[in-house]
Image: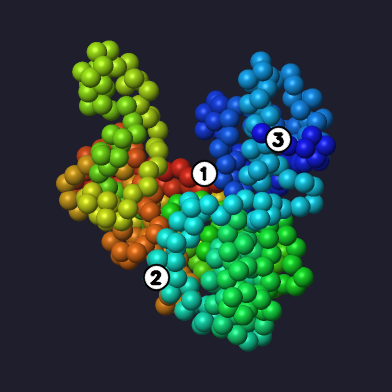
Amino acid sequence: MNIDETRILQRSGDLQVHLIGAEDVRIRGEGLDVRSGPHALAVLDAFAEPISVKEAMERLRGRAAGVQDWLDLLGTVVGLHEHGVLVEPGTSPQAGESRLDVETQAFHVMMLEDRRRTDAFLEAIARTVGPDDTVLDLGTGTGILAMAAARAGARHVYAIEAGAVADAADALIGANGLADRITLVRGWSTRVTLPERADVLVSETIGAQPFEERVLEITRDAFRRHLEPDARMIPARLRVYALPVPKPTSVVAERAFTPAALARWSEWYGFDFRPLADFAPDDVWFVHLTDAAVRELGTPATPVFLGEVELRARHDLVFEGAGEAAVVDEGTVGAVAVYWEMELADGIVLTNDPARAADTNHWADPVAVLPRPFEVRPGQRVRIEYRYAGGAAELEARPLGE
């Protein structure tokens, strides 16, 4: 756990901080998603402006309750620096500073194995990009979409990547003889500056939760700073849907204090676990299921359209959508699956709709588990409200009368 105490650091810009618990902090930004402990907020405050590690640690010394707590505080500083939360002034984290580990490789393998996803993007790029176009590929990953834009005839492509996979993209671009037409830009798109504005933006920053990879924030910044006013966008728009489903009991049983689990533990260990029932979730919480798992749940109602975002427009950073699903079968609603469609170009649509997604679909389906399931009958409707703001999603569902 070593760090040069004379090094000047400051917290990175464009961070979102979420308090998950009293001592559990989630820090998100373009290209990073970091969980940290009880010292994280104090460390972020100490490095609000450029400061040496030594001076910051002197300011933070009063927080430490003992030697181990002091080591934990120092470990927080080191960890946040290693993950790109604390950076040297005027710089972005460099891809070479972190290793392309197996987990990162696995993520990119899944995307490349999702052939419907990749072929759809390649076809949309071939239709959209022309020989005089400058293209911005935001979050290039392995570089395949940047190379597709060059193959489509783009005059030049700027491929932005903040993660360790940038080294792999650099090697792949060079091996395919495209280094003269593709400039790899290491860093976060909200912090870098390009030498010219682009005519086309390519960006696959759609997560299982439609907005969790900050597509709203990232694309709006790109249109302000990196793109021509009439720039084209791949994808062009995003539509959000919801589907009432029964509670995924097997998943809930793995993650919550259920009555069955409490009884089982009491039998196994000889203690009364019933008080833990008071700590069961009392609000909506999200789990991620495969398409097959959502289909197996079935549904007593029809899907509902929640809203659409035109990504090339001056969209808001908050998405609020609502609609009513029609109940067609008697049953119980204990959760709501959220899915999306993204339109890449005219007639080219990708979706993680569990009823229509390809078998190779690498996106999961976010399912909001309701704290109190409710019964429904044919003729009723289910009101669903979904909201995204500041990196967090919220959902409400309630039955309406016949």
- Please tell me whether residue 376 is drawn above or below residue 238 in the rendered image: above
Dot in front, 3 or 2: 3
Give x and y (percent) for residue 122: 48, 76
At a point 80% along the width and 47% down the height, the residue shown is 89
Amino acid carrying label 1: it is Ala
Taking depth in this image into account, of 320 and 24 the one nearest to the observer is 24
Residue 315 shown left or right of residue 302 in the figure: right
The residue mark sitting in front, 2 or 1, is 2
Residue 115 numbered mark, or none: 2
State whether residue 297 appears in this view: yes
Element type at marker 3? Answer: loop
- Label 1–label 3 contact, CB within 8 A: no
Question: What is the x, y in percent for residue 287?
Answer: 37, 43
| Residue, disc 1 | 392
Q: Which amino acid does label 2 sit on?
A: Arg
- Apparent side of residue 223 relative to residue 333 in the rendered image (left or right): right
Mark 3, residue position: 2
Q: Please report whichever mark, 3 or 2, sits nearer to the chain's N-terminal start.
A: 3
Say which quarter of the image contains residue 342: bottom left
